[in-house]
Amino acid sequence: MAPKPARLMLWTRQAIAEVFARLDYGALGAIYCHEGGDEFWKVKRRLCQKLGTALAGVVRRRLKPGGRSLYVGAGVAELALLAMEALERRRHVVACNLRKNEVRILNRACAGLPFRFEARDAAMVRGTFDHLWLVSVLNDPECYPELSELSYGRANPATFDPRRFARERRQVVRVVDRCLRRLSRPGLVTTSTEEAHWIADWCAAHGVPWRLERRQYPSPTVGDPICFMRLG
């Protein structure tokens, strides 16, 4: 039987609850949804907090104190994990998000906590990290529509654009390469099962041994199965 997730400290759980209470869900709705954003967060708000807090307990066991983590495309789903790393593991976290409006909303809600969201490309961040968070990024339907449809098994052979897919694939390969080059070894990658293929492909191309943990966990917002990969 797999061990239960470690329960976060009381002050961490309180901090997470306060952040979720301060979020501007009206503004977030317009960012996350083309329409129906208010209804989306009515359904997802408590679930996202609950799943994120549980996942933070799972990740907590896998991280050593005082390390550094790079979060690619960090948003509401990552709030509990960032709080856990900063408050309980005293780790330095770099949370990148290209949507400036969302970054402002998140930073207002996280005022007083020892981390900030940054509106910049994670692939351009300098330095090394022992943990890379790369979840629901490489299959994002807004950034990579053709790749996303293929990844989730929804590609329509009558309308699928192979040239656009090839262009998106080159973009993803560059993102993966830039991020993984900053991962110290041994290192941990938290990703979705769909995106794990990109990590494995990079490792094969660079002669880096890797191991995939069997157990999976639902991501806090979209429900993608999350897994852990050990590199080196």
Image: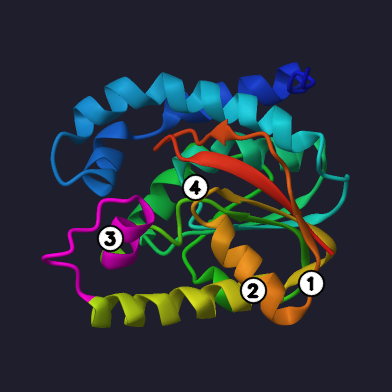
Front label number (2 vs 3)? 2
| Disc nearer the start of the sequence (2/3) | 3
Front label number (1 vs 3)? 1
| 5 in relation to 229, above or below | above
Please, what is the three-letter code of the amino acid marked with disc 2? Trp
Asked if the residues shown at circle 2 and circle 1 are in contact, with their CB atoms under 8 angstroms apart, the answer is: yes
Residue under label 1, please give it.
Answer: 208
Kindly give the residue lying farthest to the front in the view shown: 157
| 28 in relation to 50, above or below | below
Return the x and y of residue 4 as percentages of the image width and height.
Answer: 75, 18
| Disc nearer the start of the sequence (4/2) | 4
User: Which of the numbered marks, if any, corresponds to residue 202?
Assistant: 2
Residue at 39% over, 25% down: 45
Counting other residues with Cα less than 10 Å from the Cα at mark 2, is it few (<14), some (14-19), or many (20 or more)? some
Front label number (4 vs 2)? 2
In the image, 229 versus 127, the foreground residue is 229
- Quadrant for residue 64, please give it: top right
Q: Which residues are magenta?
A: 146-161
Left/right of residue 206 with respect to residue 217 in the rendered view:
right
Confirm whether residue 141 shows in the render. Answer: no
Left/right of residue 190 with respect to residue 148 in the rendered view:
right
Q: What count of labels does the image hold?
A: 4
Residue at 12% over, 66% down: 159
Residue under label 4, please give it.
Answer: 107
